[in-house]
Amino acid sequence: MRLLNRTARRVSRHRRSRLAGFVLMLFALLATGTVYSALSPAQAEQATSDAELVAKGRDLFLVGCSYCHGQNGEGQRDQNGQNFGPPLVGVGAAAVDFQVGTGRMPMAQPGQQAPQKEVAYSDEEVAALAAYVASLGVGPAIPSSAQYSLEGMTDEEKQEAIVRGGQIFLANCTACHNFEGSGGAMPRGGHAPKIRGVEPKYIYEAMLTGPQQMPTFSEGTMTPEAKRDVIAYLNSIDENPSYGGFGLGGYGPVAEGMVAWLGGIGALVGFAVWIAAHTTRTTRKTKAAAGEDQA
């Protein structure tokens, strides 16, 4: 009992000390920091990993992209004041993933439209470039597979999504990409590329960022569900066979009419001319033979 009383008096004296509050607060901060560090090491590692990815992306950007887009993504202009390379601040990681991931960037030379070609960077390098450009300003992020996939839906829900996507596509996209996504010519030397067989992620990113002459369908303009439904419709076209014979690129009645005139009717006209010429030669031979007989 005496020992307990003595200990209690000692603790009570320390509590009344001026440094007791400071020591207690310091101890609480140290304990909080220790617990936080122990429970969230993954976040610290993720922050370090992101910083390293951005640094790697900047190194790649300075070598392969800065000539056109500027060393800090501010863009470049030619002597006439036209965009030599547009600014990239605020375009987001999705735009970089689409342009570089499909081989459209880097361009061999500036032009009206960047054609799709062989990809120049690996997947890791594309991710690094996207991370660096995303660090320049807030913009659309790379979509996850859950945003454009129909996984988890019943067959009936999938069919409903395809029907909705077809309606949206026919109302907003056929003017450029035609009714089955085979692409088409555009004004001023541009063209709407074929979107059949394209990876769903890139279709989503194209709608989200609006590359080249394509309008931007932001999340406010077209919901993520609507984008997903459009992708489902395009996938359904790829999966369904065509029973109409030669598709002729799906360019519509003008192309089909031209082929019908030049190929079908043209062949008939040529055959008719050949018949007429053959009949004329036969008639001449018959008349010549009849004249010899009379002689």
Image (tube, grey):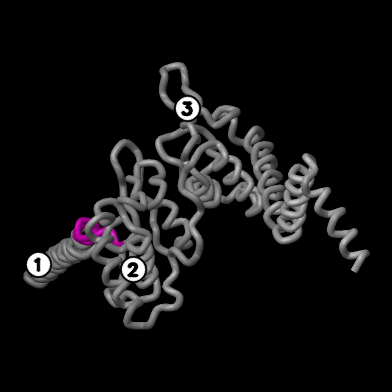
Please give the name of the residue rendered at 66% of the width and 34% of the height, measured from the top-left corner: 63
Q: Nearer the viewer, residue 139 or 272?
A: 139
Whether residue 288 can be seen here: no
Residue assigned mark 3: 84
Q: Position of residue 22 (x, y in %)?
A: 76, 42
The answer to if 220 sits in the magenta stretch is no
Q: Is residue 81 above or below residue 65?
A: above
Residue assigned mark 1: 287
Q: Position of residue 43 (x, y in %)?
A: 68, 55
The answer to if 255 sits in the magenta stretch is yes
| CA gap, disc 2 and disc 1 | 68 Å
Residue assigned mark 2: 233
Front tag of 1 and 3: 3
Q: Amino acid at mark 2?
A: Tyr
How packed mark 1 is, by other alpha carbons closer than 10 Å (few <14, some 14-19, many 20 or more), is few
Q: Which residues are magenta?
A: 250-258
Q: Amino acid at mark 3?
A: Phe
Element class at badge 3: strand
Q: Position of residue 85 (x, y in %)?
A: 49, 30
Circle nearer the N terminus (2, 3): 3
Please give the name of the residue rendered at 61% of the width and 49% of the height, measured from the top-left corner: 126
| CA gap, disc 1 and disc 3 | 77 Å
How packed mark 3 is, by other alpha carbons closer than 10 Å (few <14, some 14-19, many 20 or more), is some
**Which label was assigned to residue 28?**
none
Within the image, what quadrant is residue 237 found in?
bottom left
90 sits to left or right of 26: left
Q: Is residue 160 above or below residue 15?
A: below
Q: Nearer the viewer, residue 276 or 42?
A: 42
| CA gap, disc 2 and disc 3 | 37 Å
219 sits to left or right of 58: left
